[in-house]
Image (tube, rainbow, N blue to C red):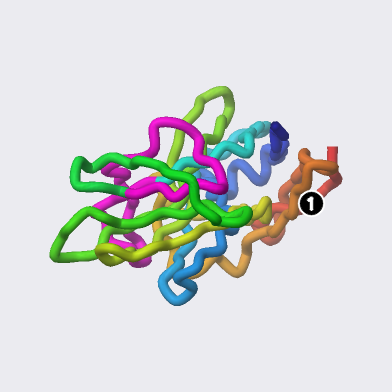
């Protein structure tokens, strides 16, 4: 299981300039319901001179009554008890829990909403991240899934990081900020060292670790 790492460095000038702001990170998730798939600010945290962010390739499915619209914070009503696997269909049922059964899903993670409700449920992938030694789990993306419908998800280690005013984890984004730095991690290059441009208040790529 690969552990991915962002090693972030900001000098004192940069810290002073972004005082009161946060650092937000988003991650790419593709979905079968393309039109309604929105990214989230997966994690947001206070800046510091040196911050290490780590995560592994363990994913969870969640269901939420929160709206899948820009600015909403995803409050995960329920999520799978353990990390999910491809080759399984995870059904969100009337007991507000997920159950699984073998299915031909390819490499994607697939879910079905079998929770009757006047409105579709918001569903997607969630993942844990450790920031400066503190671990939290929040939503990576948000899709509205109507009753008795399926959705499948594939996570990609394409990371976006930017200075923001977002205070919570799992905040739905209408779009990712134009100022975001994009970094693609792989199992061969799982660690990225990032710096900060004081003139632009933007993150910069230094090297792979």
Above or below, comparing residue 176 to residue 139 in the picture: below
Which residue, as the protein is rendered here, is positioned at the far left? Answer: 118
Front-most of 165 and 91? 91
Picture quarter with the N terminus: top right
Residue at image point 35% right, 41% down: 99
Residue 67 in which image quadrant = bottom left
Residue 13 in which image quadrant = top right
| Label 1: element kind | strand
Residue 88, percent across and down? 49, 46
Q: Taking 147 as reference, is 106 left or right?
A: right
Above or below, comparing residue 63 to residue 122 in the picture: above
Residue 48 in which image quadrant = top right
Q: Mark 1 points at which residue?
A: 205
Residue at image point 40% right, 47% down: 90
Residue 29, percent across and down? 56, 58
Which residue, as the protein is rendered here, is positioned at the far bottom? Answer: 35
Can residue 162 be seen here? The reply is no
Front-most of 60 and 98? 98
Of helix, strand and loop, which mostly describes the magenta segment?
A: loop
- Extent of the magenta region: 62-91
Picture quarter with the C terminus: top right
Residue at image point 26% right, 55% down: 114
């Amino acid at each position: 299981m690969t552990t991915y790492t962002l090693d972030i460095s900001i000098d004192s000038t940069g810290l002073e300039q972004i005082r009161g702001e946060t650092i937000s990170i988003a991650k790419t998730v593709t979905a079968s319901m393309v039109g309604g798939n929105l990214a989230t600010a997966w994690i947001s945290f206070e800046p510091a001179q040196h911050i290490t962010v780590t995560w592994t390739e363990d994913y969870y499915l969640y269901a939420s009554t929160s709206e899948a619209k820009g600015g909403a914070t995803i409050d995960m009503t329920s999520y799978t008890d353990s990390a999910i696997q491809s080759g399984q269909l995870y059904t969100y049922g009337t007991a507000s829990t997920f159950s699984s059964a073998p299915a031909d899903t390819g490499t994607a993670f697939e879910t079905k909403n079998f929770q009757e409700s006047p409105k579709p449920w918001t569903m997607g992938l969630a993942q844990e991240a450790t920031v400066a030694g503190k671990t939290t789990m929040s939503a990576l993306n948000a899709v509205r899934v109507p009753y008795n419908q399926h959705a499948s998800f594939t996570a990609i280690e394409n990371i976006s990081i930017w200075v923001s005013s977002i205070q919570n984890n799992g905040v739905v984004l209408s779009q990712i900020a134009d100022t975001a730095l994009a970094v693609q991690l792989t199992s061969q290059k799982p660690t990225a060292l990032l710096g900060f441009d004081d003139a632009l208040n933007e993150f910069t790529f230094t090297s792979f670790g």
